[in-house]
Image (cartoon, rainbow, N blue to C red):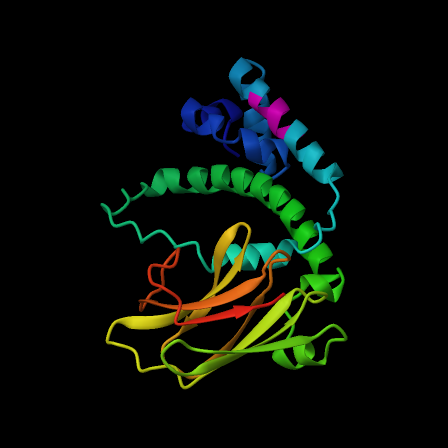
Amino acid sequence: MVDTRLRDALMAPAELHTLAGAYALGAVTDEERAAFDRHLAGCAACAEDVRGFEETAARLGAAVGAVPVERLRSRVLAEITVTRQLPPQVGSPPVPVLPARRAWHRRAGAGVAAIAAGAALLVGGISIGMQNTPVSTQVASPANVRGAADAKTVHGDGTSGGAATATLSRGLGVITVDVRSLPPLEPGRAYQCWLVGPRGPQSAGLLHRGEGSMTAALPADTDRIAITTEPVAGSPQPTTSPVLLLGLA
């Protein structure tokens, strides 16, 4: 058996510091715990780190999932359609970790990951609660929208031809838009549907030709639908006059 003094000497202090998170969560081996116990007796910084990790873990363990507020999912989905993703980052390749230190980095990462997993339980609680909330917070299928007790259908003609039919349910918080015979698009362009209300236009999706349909979450304050021509990838806000406008009042 390796002498404890020799084993501790093989573990550099910098590497022992990285065990604080894993130690607080019990994610260390018996040998690592024994070595860190001896290190902890003389390291005030690690002792403070361990107390902080243990307090955080206790708070996360006592947390409970919360049922999301009404229409939370609808608002999130509406924002997703107008929020561009960041481009992928291209940089220098990561510096490889030396084999002798790799196990310690994995162990330190395990402690941080365990804390992060606890935080994910809070998000998971919200997600689980969302699945159990009334159907008004879920994006229903077109058939469910049309069959809803409060379903309403409106029609409108385009300024240069074509037409659109919208069916909406305020109770479900969902709208389906069917477009037909809109004028052909120029290369690199698309039709973009907007849900318009006091907060301004919010994108409901793209159509890459003058025929098609889309179903989207319906913000509660939406009172109009507008369709514009935009770049093929879409725009965060309308950049042209509507080729079709529907009132939902």
Q: Nearer the viewer, residue 90 or 221?
A: 221
Q: Residue at x 34, y 72 (%)?
A: 190
Residue 12 visible here: no
Q: Residue at x 46, y 43 (%)?
A: 106
**What x and y, as percent, mark residue 36?**
55, 26
The magenta region covers: 49-54
Total number of numbered labels? 0
Q: Is residue 211 above or below residue 113?
A: below
Q: Is residue 191 left or right of residue 21?
A: left
Q: Nearer the viewer, residue 173 or 179?
A: 179
Visible in this render: residue 24?
yes
Question: Where's residue 123, x and y in %?
Answer: 63, 48
Horizontal side of 201 relative to 119 (left or right) equals left
Q: What is the magenta segment's predominant secondary structure?
A: helix
Q: Which corner quadrant holds the C terminus?
A: bottom right
> Quadrant location of residue 24?
top right
Residue 209 in the image: state x and y as whole percent: 36, 80
Identify which residue, 208 or 62, lies in the foreground.
208
The extreme bottom residue here reads: 181
Q: Is residue 101 magenta?
A: no
Residue 74 vs 53, above or below: the answer is below
Residue at 58% x, 15% y: name it.
41
Quadrant of the rendered image containing residue 244: bottom left
The vertical placement of 213 against 173, above or below, is below
Horizontal relation, residue 192 to residue 93: left or right: right
Looking at the image, residue 184 lies above or below residue 26: below
